[in-house]
Amino acid sequence: GWGEFTRAYAAQRSDTLVIAIEKKLARVISSGKTQARENIPNIRYLVLDVAWFFAGIFAADQFDEILINFPDPWPKARHHKHRFISPELTAELARICRPGAQLTFATDDYAYTREAAGVLEKSAAWENTQGPYIARSELSGRPRSYFEQLHRDEGALIYFLQYALNRHSAGSQ
């Protein structure tokens, strides 16, 4: 997105390095300028398509938290192959995360929520912290992005899936 969520999130956690990945350069430039004006030093941006990014880039056990914030749902059936969540991605995320790491997936697309939950529930590495297949509609203290607020203002429901990396599965996927 345009970085408002990332900046608010990073400002809440000034002792945490936040790596933001966005494939649209204009959004990164805009967010970076605002970040500089707001004096938020703990964000680094990567401009790329994240789907292929993790493999070979990060060593095991590097992250305490992964936030997947409103990825494109590719709503047409013929485009579902482009959706972000897959068994391969969830295994790669398990590899790069530390034991107990948190994974949050946010979307306003119910069908995508069900599909993402189905993939994550089949993974031995990830456990839904709310209970199997349970999504929440709100997360206390979580900043809202421009697009999340836009969807809410239009009356859309928001779905948050929250998973923790099983301690015995970390790095072994």
Image: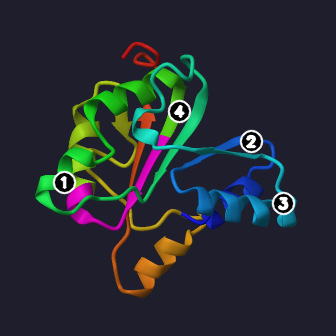
Q: Secondary structure at mark 3?
A: helix
First in sequence: mark 3 or mark 1?
Answer: 3
At mark 2, the secondary structure is loop
Q: Which of labels 2 and 1 is toward the front?
A: 1
Q: Position of residue 43 (x, y in %)?
A: 73, 48
Q: Which mark is residue 36?
A: 3
Query: What amino acid is labelled 3 in the image?
Result: Ala
Of all residues, the one furthest to the left in this rendering is: 77
Question: Which span is picked out in magenta?
Answer: 103-112
Q: Residue at x 37, y 49 (%)?
A: 130
Return the mark for residue 101.
4
Please give the label number shown on residue 16: 2
CA neighbours of label 1 inside 10 A, class few (<14), some (14 to 19), many (20+)? few
Frontmost of labels 4 and 2 is 2
Q: CA distance from mark 2 to mark 1?
A: 36 Å
Mark 3 in CB contact with mark 1 (< 8 angstroms)? no
Local SS, label 1: helix
